[in-house]
Image: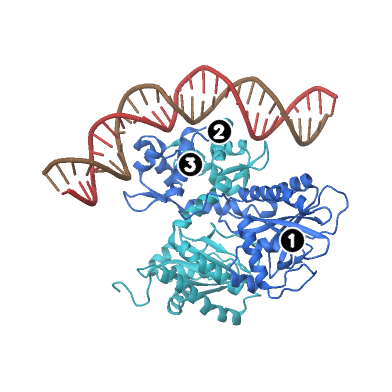
Chain colours: A cyan, B blue, C brown, D red
Amino acid sequence: MGNTTEAVGGVQSVDRALTVLSILARVGEAGVTEIAAELGVHKSTAFRLVTTLEGHELVQQTEDRGKYRLGMGLVRLAGASTARLDVVQEARPVCRRLAAECGETVNIAVLADHAALYVDQVTGGSGLQSHNWVGQHIPLHATSNGKVLLCELEADEVDRLVETLPAYTEHTITARRTLHRQLATVRAQGFAVATDELELGLTAIAAPLRSAHGDVVASMSISGPTLRLPERRVEELVPVLVDAADEVSHRLGWHRQAAVGG
Amino acid sequence: MGNTTEAVGGVQSVDRALTVLSILARVGEAGVTEIAAELGVHKSTAFRLVTTLEGHELVQQTEDRGKYRLGMGLVRLAGASTARLDVVQEARPVCRRLAAECGETVNIAVLADHAALYVDQVTGGSGLQSHNWVGQHIPLHATSNGKVLLCELEADEVDRLVETLPAYTEHTITARRTLHRQLATVRAQGFAVATDELELGLTAIAAPLRSAHGDVVASMSISGPTLRLPERRVEELVPVLVDAADEVSHRLGWHRQAAVGG
DNA sequence: GGTGGTGTTCCCCATGACGCAACGCTAGCG
DNA sequence: CGCTAGCGTTGCGTCATGGGGAACACCACC
């Protein structure tokens, strides 16, 4: 009987095990009893599922006889997953160079499920990463990456993906018309800026990564504290970012002239 | 074709499903038949497992009736996973054990802003110790931690980070060529030593901590008075330190074999 | 149009996963 | 200090459930 999300797949025990992963992703840490309650199964069942997950390192215990949380096997799998995305593979060296060059964090995002999904991140300057965004879903209308990913879609497609426009700060775009107007600008100038729109004090600029067909398949961004990225510095960074993005697009087989069947 | 992992956990079908993920991580793409063969099960069984995985977006089909590969759900889960951990947290128990085991001070350092930043410290057995390094910025060219943090960077990146090479003692490296040569050695042997280079009478050895991607994200060091750490004792401690560092790397998701390219 | 490959579906059987209950353990509290 | 209540963990008998065989739909090559 459905508590959360159930009957997704065919094999019951596998479905339950994978639901355990979702639960842990949501709550961070959980004990066997808690998981069992959420799944609606007996403790022992939950325990066996968790143990199996642990055997593959997708889950790990915080300590002996302790709670469980997601494990590093997931990171490994996700790495293998994104590594197959040729976007990430091709972009990584460029990201690294860009991050080092401007001392800010560089991200790669793709369109996934009504949101921008961050698939890679290289932190600038300091090796101690402030916050790892990889795997996070970010609202499309409040981020530079989101705007880039949307900018070449049909208007009704944009409206389908962006169902609501919640305000995160006073600068967040909340009107559909404003959004569409901004997307036109982004499309025209080839990059997007978002200042304090998702979070006060957070600024980001983004540029599109294109496949051989010319489609926008991903977005590359530079982000950092608004204090470090005032208007003047943004103006400096934009051409650097666009150049880097173009280089990645080039590696992916895109050529400015080679518009395939307009 | 070796069955890589078998009977790891308790629940058979879950175990098989997770093995499917490993297989896909290894080969990139695979069809139902291929997966079934590798698992040693019937096609239909493999199909059901894959379908369940697909329901949770851990796997996706390249096209209709096509092969399967790892999905974006993994990236999401991995993001939730890495958000909860950081180097210090994972390293702390190992540091404590290491410090107790060898009776010297153990430090964790990361690259930050043209210097090594000490982010954690566990003092060794002997009671009162020198001052606390945590939060201190330390020159990269005169410390074992610095050498480790630099050793896998590009040569020009190293030169950018190390602007000048001031001499702190008569043993400090002051020539760029010497530094680059030493970094190559560190990279090759997997650890660094610094004797009397920052301060007369102070010896330290360091080894790299790697992320799931294989990048050197931090450095772990053992340091103490040169009197207590003569060459012979350093030789004893190096394998102990490297083992400890490898263990932390492992916890962070790094696996020697898990080089993604193949 | 044959032939061998794929991913997919159905159905029946026995295997293997489930719920139960009991265990060892820790923590809190009277 | 023992008593209880909660935890994660384990063995066991039973029956739901997942597995395998075979047939299906489809594609590509010959």
Residue that sits furthest to the right in the current view:
B128
Both labels 3 and 2 in a single chain: no
Of residue A124 and residue B236, the one placed in the foreground of this image is: B236
Measure the C-alpha gap from mark 3 to mark 2.
Answer: 14 Å
Q: Residue at x 71, y 60 (%)?
A: B109
Tell me residue D16's x, y (percent).
44, 28
SS of the residue under disc 2: helix
- The amino acid type of the residue labelled 3 equals Leu
Q: Which residue is mark 2?
A: A48
Which quadrant would residue A39 be assigned to in this image?
Answer: top right
Q: Which residue is mark 1?
A: B194
Tell me residue A170's x, y (percent).
60, 71
Both labels 1 and 2 in a single chain: no
- The amino acid type of the residue labelled 2 equals Arg
Which quadrant would residue A35 be assigned to in this image?
Answer: top right
Q: Nearer the viewer, mark 1 or mark 2?
A: 1
SS of the residue under disc 3: helix
User: Which chain is disc 3 placed on?
Assistant: B
Residue that sits furthest to the front in the current view:
B232
- Binning the other alpha carbons within 10 Å of mark 2 as few (below 14), some (14 to 19) or many (20 upward) gives some
Q: Is residue D11 left or right of residue D21?
A: right
Q: Are marks 1 and 3 in contact (CB under 8 Å)?
A: no
Measure the C-alpha gap from mark 1 to mark 2.
Answer: 49 Å
Of residue A161 and residue B249, the one placed in the foreground of this image is: B249
- Binning the other alpha carbons within 10 Å of mark 1 as few (below 14), some (14 to 19) or many (20 upward) gives many
Vertical comparison of A49 with B23: above or below: above
Q: Which residue is mark 3?
A: B18
- The amino acid type of the residue labelled 1 equals Ala
Q: Is residue B85 left or right of residue D26?
A: right
Q: Nearer the viewer, mark 1 or mark 3?
A: 1
